[in-house]
Image: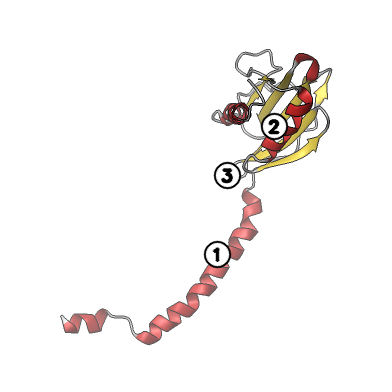
C-alpha cells in the first residue's frame, strides 16, 4: 500500500507549480470570454419602424415571435393593459416597473410612449418592448417582438403577461 502511494502521489514541488498555473489559466479563460462574447451576441439592429403611427403600434411580422394588442391576427393578439388608476398616476408606475425588469433597458420614453430593449439571459437575444398610453381609452397598448429568428418559444407573450401580473400586484392595472 505504501509503495502504491509513493508511485502515484504528487510531489510538493509539482503541487506548487500547478497552484501557480491556475491563476494564469483562469485569467486566460476570463480574457478569452470577454474577447469572444461579442461574436456570440444576438442583439441585431434596432428596428426603424418602432413607435406610434396613426395612434397604433407597429404591426407584428408574419413570424410567430411577436405579440401586440394592436394586431388583428389572433396568433399575435394580446390584451392591452386596462388601467385601474388615472393615467397620470399609472404611467409613472408602469415606467418604473418596466425599468425594474431584469435585463431591460429603457431606450425611449415620452408622456405616452415607452420603448425598452429586453435581453435574454444566456445568448443576449434582444426583444423590443413597446407601450403606448391611451388616456381617452384608459389603457396601455403593448407590443413585444423578437429582433432575430422566427420563433421566440413564447418569450414575448410571457414577458407581457409577467408585466401585467406585476402591475396588477401594484394595483396599476386590472
**Toward the viewer: 68 or 102?**
102
Q: Earlier in the sequence, mark 1 or mark 3?
A: 1
- On the question of residue 28 being in view, the answer is yes
- Element type where label 2 sits in the image: strand
Please indicate whether residue 71 sits to the left or right of residue 17 in the image.
right
In the image, residue 1 above or below residue 159: below
Please indicate whether residue 6 sits to the left or right of residue 26 in the image.
left
In the rendering, at what x and y percent does residue 15 appear? Answer: 39, 81
- What residue is disc 3 on? 121
Please tell me the numbered disc located at residue 108: none
**Mark 1 surroundings: few (<14), some (14-19) or many (≥20) residues within 10 A:** few
Q: Gap in Å between the C-alphas at discs 1 and 2?
A: 34 Å
In the rendering, at what x and y percent does residue 154 appear? Answer: 55, 28
**Toward the viewer: 123 or 129?**
129
Q: Gap in Å between the C-alphas at discs 3 and 2?
A: 16 Å
**Toward the viewer: 38 or 106?**
106
| Quadrant of the rendering where the C terminus is positioned | top right
- What residue is disc 1 on? 29
| Quadrant of the rendering where the N terminus is positioned | bottom left
In the image, residue 83 above or below residue 29: above
Colour mode?
secondary structure
Please tell me the numbered disc located at residue 129: 2
- Element type where label 3 sits in the image: loop
Q: Earlier in the sequence, mark 1 or mark 2?
A: 1
**Mark 3 surroundings: few (<14), some (14-19) or many (≥20) residues within 10 A:** few
Please indicate whether residue 150 sits to the left or right of residue 20 in the image.
right
- Element type where label 1 sits in the image: helix
Which quadrant holds residue 121? top right
Question: Which is in the foreground here, disc 1 or disc 3?
Answer: 3
Q: Gap in Å between the C-alphas at discs 1 and 3?
A: 20 Å
Amino acid at each position: 500500500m505504501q509503495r502504491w502511494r509513493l508511485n502515484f502521489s504528487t510531489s510538493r514541488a509539482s503541487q506548487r507549480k500547478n497552484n501557480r498555473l491556475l491563476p494564469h489559466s483562469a485569467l486566460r479563460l476570463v480574457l478569452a470570454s470577454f474577447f469572444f462574447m461579442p461574436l456570440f451576441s444576438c442583439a441585431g439592429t434596432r428596428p426603424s419602424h418602432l413607435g406610434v403611427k396613426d395612434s397604433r403600434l407597429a404591426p407584428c411580422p408574419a413570424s410567430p415571435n411577436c405579440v401586440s394588442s394592436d394586431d388583428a391576427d389572433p396568433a399575435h393578439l394580446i390584451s392591452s393593459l386596462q388601467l385601474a388608476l388615472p393615467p397620470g398616476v399609472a404611467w409613472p408606475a408602469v415606467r418604473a416597473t418596466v425599468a425594474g425588469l431584469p435585463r431591460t433597458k429603457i431606450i425611449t420614453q415620452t408622456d405616452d410612449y415607452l420603448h425598452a430593449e429586453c435581453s435574454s439571459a444566456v445568448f443576449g437575444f434582444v426583444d423590443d418592448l413597446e407601450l403606448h398610453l391611451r388616456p381617452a381609452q384608459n389603457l396601455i397598448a403593448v407590443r413585444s417582438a423578437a429582433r432575430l429568428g422566427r420563433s421566440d418559444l413564447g418569450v414575448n407573450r410571457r414577458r407581457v403577461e409577467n408585466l401585467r401580473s406585476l402591475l396588477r400586484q401594484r394595483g396599476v392595472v386590472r
